[in-house]
Amino acid sequence: MKKTVIAILLAVVALLAFRSLVMTIYTIEGAALEPLFESGDRILVNRWSYGLRTGSIEGLFGYGRIGSQMPSRGDIIAFDDPSGSGEGVFLGRVTSLPGDTVTTRQGTYLVPGEVTCANQNYYMVDMGKDGLMPVTIPETCIIGRVILIVYNHDDKYPVMSGYAPKRWCLLP
């Protein structure tokens, strides 16, 4: 009996370590990635695909990745809710890479390149017709080499409505 309890406890500890360090399971909610994934599907996400994540963006230790690599066009990535509300993890397909022009129904987001201003490196984002003005994003906000440009498919909400500036730029 004692060996059975020890075996069960070791299995539970191994399962928890596996889910927190190697892979985790998410349930799809919504239709954004149909027909590939339908609402209710369960997926297994590899936590090491783009390097081991260390620290957190707003935590005690700095955010970074060990052995990081850049996602490729077409990859499906999991990332934290950009609004910082803690609502969960979002899934999205990488449709553009640095230097590409991202077009939406409401306007064009263009990352034309690096702009130097007051000894700071900034990247300018042209908001297009629907934006208030061009926005500069400090290089310190861009973690690694991937930038998440958030836009709404729904015309009822402003483009950056509810998104905290520190969370616009995330790695998957």
Image (cartoon, helix red, strand yellow):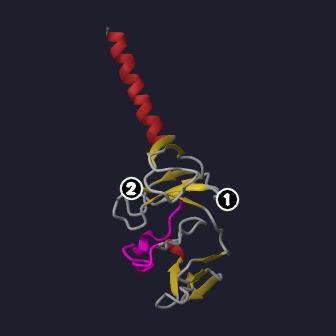
Q: 154 or 140, which lies in front?
A: 154
Residue at the location (61% across, 78% down)? 103
Residue assigned mark 2: 88
Q: 165 or 63, which lies in front?
A: 165
Amino acid at circle 1: Ser
Pointer 1 local density, CA inside 10 Å: few below 14, some 14–19, many at least 20? few
Q: Is 87 above or below relative to 164?
A: above
Image quadrant assignment for residue 125: bottom right
Residue assigned mark 1: 72
In terms of sequence position, does the residue under pointer 1 or pointer 2 come before the other?
1
Q: Quadrant of the N terminus?
A: top left
Residue 157: percent from the left, percent from the top? 40, 78
Image quadrant assignment for residue 114: bottom right
Query: Is residue 158 toward the left or the right of residue 2 in the image?
Result: right
Start-end of magenta stretch: 154-172
The chief SS type of the magenta part is loop
Residue 130: percent from the left, percent from the top? 49, 87
Q: Is 24 above or below relative to 118?
A: above
Outermost top residue: 1
Residue at the location (51% across, 79% down)? 138
Query: Is residue 13 toward the left or the right of residue 125 in the image?
Result: left
The dot on residue 91 is none
Q: 77 or 17, which lies in front?
A: 77
Residue 122: percent from the left, percent from the top? 56, 82
As for residue 86 lying within the magenta part, the answer is: no
SS of the residue under disc 1 = loop
As for residue 168 lying within the magenta part, the answer is: yes
Residue at the location (45% across, 74% down)? 154
Image quadrant assignment for residue 121: bottom right
Residue 31: percent from the left, percent from the top? 48, 57
Pointer 2 local density, CA inside 10 Å: few below 14, some 14–19, many at least 20? few
Amino acid at circle 2: Gly
